[in-house]
Amino acid sequence: MHELADDVFILGGFPMYAINAYLLGDIVVDAGVRWMRRGLLRQLRGRRLAAHVLTHAHPDHQGSSRALCRAFGLPLCCGARDAAAMEQGDTAALLPRSFANRLLAAGFGGGAYPVARRLRAGDHVGSFTVVETPGHTPGHISLWRAADRTLILGDVLANQHPLTQRVGLIEPLARFTLDPARNRQSARAVAALGPQLVCFGHGPPLRDGAALRAFVAGLP
């Protein structure tokens, strides 16, 4: 675990930056795949935690959510339109239909868990504000802190290819994205905020807001 900004920590995984989770003060954001639970529990042991938030309920973000919530007694929060899939343990419903995605959901995802709070635009999560960023999933959210222009982006964009692990800005792969066109609209909306630190679901953080805006400007 290391600090990226005031009270913003990235939780280490293996390989580093392949699948990210964050600690924002006392709030855990995302939880990787199910086999990351031991590492996450170890890094968080002894900390006073208040809640667990999902940027979206894909299996590589909620895989250890149930384990975290049970271990620390945390309420689970996620975007309103992803909540049903999380509560039913049906993460495949948030992926384009394919046999490969059904296997992905079964192999990587965690079990169902009750959603205590359905997040919507303008809600507050600690020192951050919820920004609805649908497209990758219907209920995808990002978290924005205007005071220091920090953005927890989720999977609106990635800064590392999920298969080759090559670092660089990319759109989320279409095979994992329900509405790519809507996702591009979300990318444009968050780029317009002018972030100075962008924290991705996949890939290392980016401290070059101009690079983000240039990439988004080039989207179709």
Image (cartoon, rainbow, N blue to C red):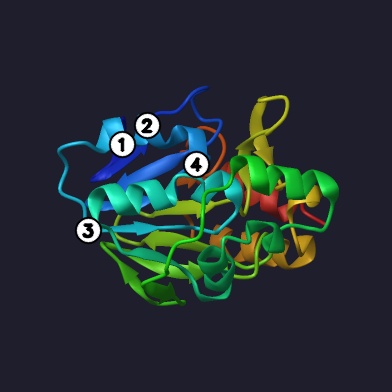
CB under 8 Å between discs 3 and 4 = no
Residues at badges 1 and 2 in contact (C-beta under 8 Å)? Answer: yes
| Callout 3 crowding tier (Cα within 10 Å): few <14, some 14–19, many ≥20 | some
Q: Which residue is mark 1?
A: 41
Which residue is found at the position 51% from the left and 67% from the top?
87
User: Disc 4 versus disc 2: distance between alpha carbons?
Assistant: 11 Å
* Circle nearer the viewer, 2 or 3: 2
Image-based side of 84 in relation to 148, left or right? right
Q: In the rendered structure, which amino acid carries the disc numbered 1?
A: Leu
Mark 4 against mark 2, which lies toward the viewer?
A: 2
How many residues crowd mark 4 within 10 Å: few (<14), some (14–19), many (20+)?
A: many
Viewer-nearest residue: 188 or 131: 131
Q: Tag 4, which secondary structure?
A: loop
N-term-proximal mark, 1 vs 4: 4
What SS does tag 1 mark? helix
Q: CA distance from mark 1 to mark 4?
A: 12 Å
Which residue is disc 2 drawn over? 38
Residue bearing the label numbered 3: 50
Percent of width and height locating residue 160: 63, 33
Report if the CB atoms under discs 1 and 3 are less than 8 Å apart.
no
Q: Tell me if mark 2 has few (under 14), some (14-19) or many (20+) residues whose alpha carbon lies within 10 angstroms of its own.
A: few
In front: 129, or 42?
42
Q: What is the distance, in whole Å, between disc 1 and disc 3 at their CAs?
A: 15 Å
Query: Marks 2 and 3, how far apart in space?
Result: 19 Å
CA–CA distance in space, label 3 to label 4: 19 Å
